[in-house]
Image (cartoon, rainbow, N blue to C red):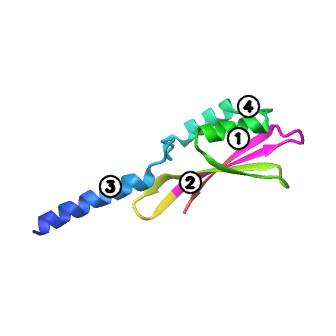
Amino acid sequence: MIYKIRLILLIFLSILTVGCTYNHLNVTTNNVDEFKHKFVTDLPTGTPKENIESYLNSKMISFTYLDKKNVIYASIPNIGRFRLIYTAGLFIHIKLDKDQNLASIAFDLQYG
């Protein structure tokens, strides 16, 4: 009986761990540098704001635009997890110039 309970608990924890770390882009802490390289390659300096928003929408990356700061903030949650100790998320800061074109991109990998 205890064997069955342990087996069920093991299966449940395995499913929980996989489910919590999954994101639709398959970005993980192991391949985040590859993702960042592709991101800046796909969105070079000078890309218009509308194209940036279309790109983010096509990748289903959640984002918000702050008009006062002229910045697009985007995030990809749950790119990593170490047991129940921490999770990781990638935050993307896209600065636009006065003409609403991409000026710079900064990435922030945060652990919580």
- SS class of the residue under badge 2? strand
Q: Quadrant of the C terminus?
A: bottom right
Q: For residue 104: magenta?
A: yes
- SS class of the residue under badge 3? helix
Amino acid at dot 1? Glu
- Image quadrant assignment for residue 68: bottom right
Q: Nearer the viewer, mark 1 or mark 4?
A: 1
Q: Position of residue 95 (x, y in %)?
A: 79, 45
Closest to the observer, 39 or 52: 52
The answer to which of marks 3 and 1 sits earlier in the sequence is 3
Would you say the residues marked 4 and 2 are in contact, meaning their CB atoms lie under 8 Å apart?
A: no
Name the disc covering residue 15, or none: 3
Query: Residue sitting at 58 percent across and 43 percent down?
Result: 60
Which residue is identified by label 1?
A: 53
The answer to which of marks 4 and 3 sits earlier in the sequence is 3
Which residue is identified by label 2?
A: 89
- SS class of the residue under badge 4? loop
Which residue is identified by label 4?
A: 44
The answer to which of marks 4 and 2 sits earlier in the sequence is 4
